[in-house]
Amino acid sequence: MRSAWWQAFGSTDLNTIVDAALQNNQDIAIAAARISEVMSQADLAQARLSAEAGHHDWACFACHQAAEKAAAHRRDEA
């Protein structure tokens, strides 16, 4: 979800320009996808560390959640 702050100006021209820029700027989409992927990897790493420390119930849940996030991220990229 992104904030449409520019719409507060009430300019149809500005809305058209910003919408076109957002649709055509793949660099931002790629960066956002990479951030999401790294966050999922960090969640998975923390869950694995918790399992090694003996917190198996939480780690099992966290691993499952992290794996689901990573799978959803891969589906979104496809």
Image: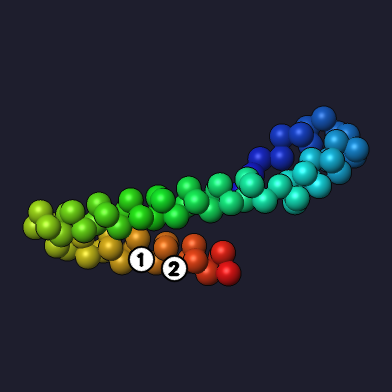
- Tell me residue 69's x, y (percent): 42, 62
Determine whether, in the image, residue 47 is placed left or right of residue 35: left
Q: Are marks 2 and 1 in contact (CB under 8 Å)?
A: yes
Mark 2 Cα-neighbour bin, 10 Å: few <14, some 14–19, many ≥20: some
| Residue, far left | 54
Where residue 11 sits: x, y (%)? 88, 34
Describe the element under mark 1 as helix, strand or loop: helix
Can see residue 39? yes
Q: Residue furthest right?
A: 13
- The residue at the far front in this view is 27
Residue 44 located left or right of residue 33: left
Q: Nearer the viewer, residue 7 or 46?
A: 46
Residue at x-position 85% and y-position 36%:
14
Residue drawn at (66%, 40%), measured in percent from left and top? 3
Question: Which quadrant is the C terminus positioned in?
Answer: bottom right
Locate residue 4 relative to residue 34 in the image: left or right: right
How many residues crowd mark 1 within 10 Å: few (<14), some (14–19), many (20+)? some
Residue closer to the observer: 52 or 61: 52
Label 1 belongs to which residue?
67
Q: CA distance from mark 2 to mark 1?
A: 6 Å
The disc labelled 1 sits on which kind of residue?
A: Ala
Disc 2 element: helix
Q: How is the image coloured?
A: rainbow
Q: Which residue is mark 2?
A: 71
Outermost residue toward the top? 9
Residue at x 39% of width, y 55% of height: 40
Question: Visible in this render: residue 58?
Answer: no
Q: Please name the amino acid that badge 2 sits on.
A: Ala
